[in-house]
Image: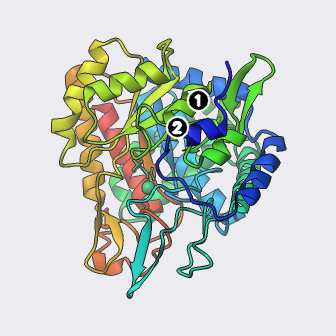
């Protein structure tokens, strides 16, 4: 299968692309990336596809999470470790409750490019190009920082490589040891007032682990986990340059991450993102917002997964807590009735963003939970499998989303608001979400 060239993709008029001032510099960056070694291997993408196929069959649950926007400055050992730790903690709780494998996918090692609702940003009467993620321009509100710089695409590659290197070391080098992760969870339950509500489930897990130990079970899986990278495939120069023909199978893979997705703003059927991703073999996702018609979803499935291969396609719905119960059923029903093989995953973040009176973009923890509950209820009523959750989170104690057991208020947002894009669940809110989703899974 051949890959369309970059110029023909641009000829389709893709949305959300940077306007680079110097084409020579773009060509140089793309040339550099084309010769760079793969960040992930095709065989790993196939493994993940097989795991997502199990999600499609209702035999596994997907946990996908991480920053809205990674930053180059955020590539530190502490930051990567804290994110990974909270995801591993969540995964243990969910695995126990779901009694099926949890497929662990980070919004990590590549999540550097952002679609924006406006090309421009105005502050105090000054208007500049919007920040489009570290992949494109700088967050500083200065004219110089906001000029798109293609060298940043090479920096994305290097930052992703450094992150992935650390993640791989952590998950295979003892850090993901089940006993250890469970100890972090019992610390959370013991030490935080929020955690105490989940004491019962934590002690059930404790008993299960003690039983396994008593009978002498000590499989490899207790000491290491499979962890995968993912990001939104947005900047065509980068994703195209990282698309390579795999020598084993003679087919193209986007080797910038194991799983890539198409965002709500770039999922036009006849445009470049759908076209490019229709040619790669990775497992892929598409975000579906409340305006998606069943015909849109069916057409996307036909174009992106013409052979109806399970595991290839994930629909990540992001309706908002107030719309999901009404909007999701007809979508799921029609897609299901057409026999389309797809994993359904809930993004309870992007339909629930609002601006607090202080000007911070935020989300209410209760809305997030309410959307996940709606997602479970809709799928249960239709007999389809609520396949997973896709969340924006961090392992740090930031103050970006309001509510949760810590009862974070709008007035608290200024305390530690560090996201350069959308608000993330902090460590405690993320763990709380995991326990609450665990309860939904058990019902
Ligand atoms: C995101 O995942 O950060 C994002 C922009 O989502 P969506 O495409 O669903 O708006
Ligand atoms: Mn986001």
Give the quarter of the figure containing the C terminus.
top left
Count of residue discs: 2
SS state under label 2: helix
Q: Is residue 215 above or below residue 237?
A: above
Q: Is residue 83 above or below residue 233?
A: below
- Residue 142, percent across and down? 56, 82
**Observer able to see residue 91:** yes
Which residue appears at 50% of the width and 48% of the height? 65
Which residue appears at 63% of the width and 48% of the height? 180
User: Viewer-proximal residue, 314 or 6?
Assistant: 6
Q: Which mark is residue 212?
A: 1
Which residue appears at 56% of the width and 58% of the height? 18
- Residue 222, percent across and down? 65, 35
Give the quarter of the figure containing the N terminus.
top right
User: Viewer-proximal residue, 107 or 338?
Assistant: 338
Work out how far the residue at label 1 is from the one at label 2, CA to CA, in angstroms: 50 Å
- Give the side of residue 240 with respect to residue 209, left or right: right
Which residue appears at 58% of the width and 20% of the height? 50
Crowd class of label 2 (few under 14; some 14 to 19; many from 20; radius 10 Å): many
Please report whichever mark, 1 or 2, sits nearer to the chain's N-terminal start: 1
Q: Is mark 2 within 8 Å of ligand 1?
A: no
Q: Which corner quadrant of the image does residue 146 belong to?
A: bottom right
Q: Which mark is residue 272?
A: 2
Residue at the far bottom in the pictured view:
124
SS state under label 1: helix
**Observer able to see residue 217:** no
Crowd class of label 1 (few under 14; some 14 to 19; many from 20; radius 10 Å): few
Q: Is residue 383 above or below residue 402?
A: above
- Residue 200, percent across and down? 36, 46
């Amino acid at each position: 299968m051949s890959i369309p060239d970059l110029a023909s993709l641009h000829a389709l008029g893709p949305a959300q692309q940077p306007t680079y001032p110097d084409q020579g510099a773009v060509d140089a960056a793309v040339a550099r990336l084309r010769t760079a070694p793969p960040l992930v291997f095709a065989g790993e993408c196939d493994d993940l596809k097989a795991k997502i196929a199990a999600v499609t069959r209702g035999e596994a649950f997907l946990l996908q999470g991480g920053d809205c926007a990674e930053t180059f400055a955020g590539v530190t050992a502490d930051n990567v470790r804290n994110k990974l730790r909270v995801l591993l903690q969540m995964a243990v709780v969910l695995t126990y409750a779901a009694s099926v494998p949890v497929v662990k996918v980070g919004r990590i090692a590549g999540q550097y490019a952002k679609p924006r609702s406006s090309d421009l940003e105005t502050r105090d009467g000054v208007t500049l190009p919007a920040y489009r993620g570290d992949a494109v321009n700088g967050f500083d509100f200065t004219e110089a920082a906001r000029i798109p710089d293609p060298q940043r695409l090479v920096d994305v590659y290097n930052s992703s490589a450094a992150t992935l290197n650390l993640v791989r070391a952590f998950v295979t080098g003892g850090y993901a040891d089940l006993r250890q992760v469970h100890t972090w969870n019992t610390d959370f339950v013991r030490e935080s007032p929020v955690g105490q509500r989940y004491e019962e489930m934590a002690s059930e897990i404790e008993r299960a682990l003690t039983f396994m130990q008593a009978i002498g079970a000590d499989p490899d899986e207790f000491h290491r986990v499979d962890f995968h990278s993912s990001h939104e495939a947005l900047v065509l120069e980068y994703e195209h340059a990282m698309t390579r023909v795999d020598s084993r199978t003679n087919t193209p893979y986007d080797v910038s991450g194991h799983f890539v997705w198409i965002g709500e703003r770039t999922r036009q059927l006849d445009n470049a993102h759908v076209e490019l991703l229709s040619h790669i073999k990775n497992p892929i996702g598409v975000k579906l917002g409340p305006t998606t018609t069943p015909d849109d979803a069916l057409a996307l499935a036909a174009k992106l997964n013409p052979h109806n291969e399970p595991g290839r396609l994930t629909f990540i719905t992001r309706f908002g807590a107030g719309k999901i119960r009404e909007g999701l059923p007809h979508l799921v029903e029609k897609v299901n009735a057409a026999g389309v093989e797809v994993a359904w995953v809930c993004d309870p973040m992007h339909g629930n963003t609002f601006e607090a009176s202080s000007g911070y973009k935020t989300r209410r923890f209760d809305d997030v939970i309410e959307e996940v509950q709606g997602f479970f209820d809709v799928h249960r009523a239709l007999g389809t499998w609520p396949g997973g959750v896709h969340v924006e989170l961090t392992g740090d104690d930031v103050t970006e989303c309001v509510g949760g057991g810590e009862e974070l208020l709008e007035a608290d947002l200024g305390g530690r608001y560090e996201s350069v894009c959308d608000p993330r669940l902090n460590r405690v809110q993320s763990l709380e979400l995991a326990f609450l989703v665990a309860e939904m899974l058990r019902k």
